[in-house]
Image (tube, rainbow, N blue to C red):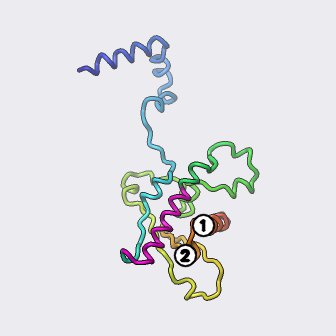
Amino acid sequence: MLQTPMLQQIRDGMRVYNLLEVIGMHPTLCSHLYVPKEDDRPDSDYIMNILAPVLSEKGSPKRAKENSIINFFQDFLQDLEVTGLDEEHDEGNWSLEQQESRLSVPSILQWLTGQRHKPLLPSDRATFKINVEFDHHCNERMPGHSICFPVVSTNTVTFPVEHMQTSAQFRHVLTMAIRMGRVFSRV
C-alpha cells in the first residue's frame, strides 16, 4: 500500500522528461534500463563454483599440494579479471598475434569446456561442473622430462602437480598450455 504513492511519484517524475513516451515508443531499447538481465559472461567466482576437484585423503601431503593448485588457479582467474583485457572492446586496435595471445576468464572457460559462456538453460547450469584431477606421478611415468601441461578432456582438467609447485610455475605452465593449445581448437 505504501508502494503505490512511491511508484506514482516515480511515474510523475518520468513524465517531466517524457520518459514514459520514449519507453512506450522504444520498449526494447529501454528494457535493459528497468529489467535486470542475467549476465552470461563467466567470472572467476563462477568458474571456481563449478569446479569439482577430486582430492586426496584429508591431511595428506598430496591434499596440501592439490589445495595449493586450486588456490593458484583462483588467484590466476582473479588476476585475469583485474588486469586482463576486455575482449569485447577494442579488438580492432590489436594485431592478430596480440588478439590470439590475450587471456580472459571466458577464454579459460572455453579452454576447459569448449564454450565461452555459461550454459543457457537453468537445468544445464545446475548440473554443469568441471572435474579437476591431479597427476602426482608424471615423473615416475616419464623420468627425466622437464615439463607437463594440464590435460583437458570432456569437462575435466588434470593438473601436473610436480610442475606446478609455486604460483609462478602454475601461471607459466597454464598460460603456455592455453596459448599453445588454442591452435589445435581452430579449424
Mark 1 lies on a secondary structure that is: helix
Q: Residue 138: name its quadrant.
A: bottom right
Pointer 1: what residue?
174
- Residue lying farthest to the top in this orientation: 16
Determine the residue positioned at 74% across, 44% down: 93
Q: Main secondary structure of the magenta part?
A: helix
Mark 2 lies on a secondary structure that is: strand
Indicate the position of residue 74 as horizontal and vertical percent values: 50, 59
Distance CA(mark 2)–CA(mark 1): 10 Å
Judging depth in this view, the residue of 63 and 149 nearest the camera is: 63
Determine the residue positioned at 39% across, 13% down: 12
Mark 1 is on which residue type?
Answer: Leu
- Quadrant containing the C terminus in the rendered view: bottom right
**Magenta segment:** 59-77
From the viewer's perspective, is residue 146 above or below residue 100? below
Judging depth in this view, the residue of 97 and 169 nearest the camera is: 169
Pointer 2: what residue?
160
Determine the residue positioned at 44% across, 51% down: 120
Is residue 75 a member of the stretch shown in magenta? Answer: yes
From the viewer's perspective, is residue 121 above or below residue 59? above
